[in-house]
Image (cartoon, rainbow, N blue to C red):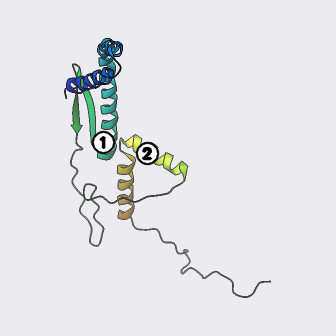
Amino acid sequence: MDLTSYVNNLGREFATLAEAGGPEARALVERLTGSLESAIRMTLLDALSAAADEITQDLAPGSVAVRLRGRDPDFVVSLPAAEAPEPAAEGELQVAEDGPAARINVRMPEHLKAAIEEAAAREGRSVNAWLVRAAAAGLRQPAASTEPRGGRRARQGFTGWVR
């Protein structure tokens, strides 16, 4: 990606703004434009790197990286290796991570959120990808029974009047 046209456009915008300030402002902008070129390039690279990080979070376990070739950035996209889906047993829910997505909001204790973020980082995944896998794994395992071991759960409660 060639940043020269973007840097030149900013230089022209500065020159246009300086026209309103008269000859002294124009001379100042001309002196500063050359010095600002490297600062503008670095700022653009920072913005591109931040964008690549955000895209990587949504693309996980794939990633996007910004690499410099000379003075110009290149984007490198790494897609995850295709994993063969596990065959679903009869009556079992088949969970695909790459299909249409739906959004849900989840509220959880702060310490649990921190533990999930650490686990995702250890696996090199985004929190979203880690949670999708954890939910899919949870659905594959039989649910634990909530009944007491002795049989059916007894009804607990009180009836009557209170003063």
Residue 147 picture location, percent across and down: 53, 75
**Quarter the N terminus occupies:** top left
Question: Residue drawn at (32%, 24%), measured in percent from left and top?
Answer: 17
Residue 75 picture location, percent across and down: 22, 33
Residue 48 picture location, percent across and down: 30, 32
Which mark is first along the chain, 1 or 2?
1
Helix, strand or loop for disc 1 = helix
User: Label 1: how many residues lie within 10 Å, few (<14), some (14-19) or many (20+)?
Assistant: some
Q: Nearer the viewer, residue 3 or 52?
A: 3
Task: Please give left or right for residue 1 compared with residue 40 in the image.
Answer: left
Helix, strand or loop for disc 2 = helix
Q: Residue furthest bottom?
A: 160
Task: Name which residue type carries label 2.
Answer: Ala
Q: Quadrant of residue 150?
A: bottom right
- Vertical position of residue 122 compared to residue 9: above or below: below
From mark 2 to mark 1, how far is it between C-alphas?
Answer: 20 Å
Q: Nearer the viewer, residue 152 or 28?
A: 28
Residue 119 image label: 2
- Vertical position of residue 158 compared to residue 88: above or below: below
- Vertical position of residue 49 compared to residue 157: above or below: above
Task: Name which residue type carries label 1.
Answer: Ile
Residue 55 image label: 1
Q: Quadrant of residue 41?
A: top left
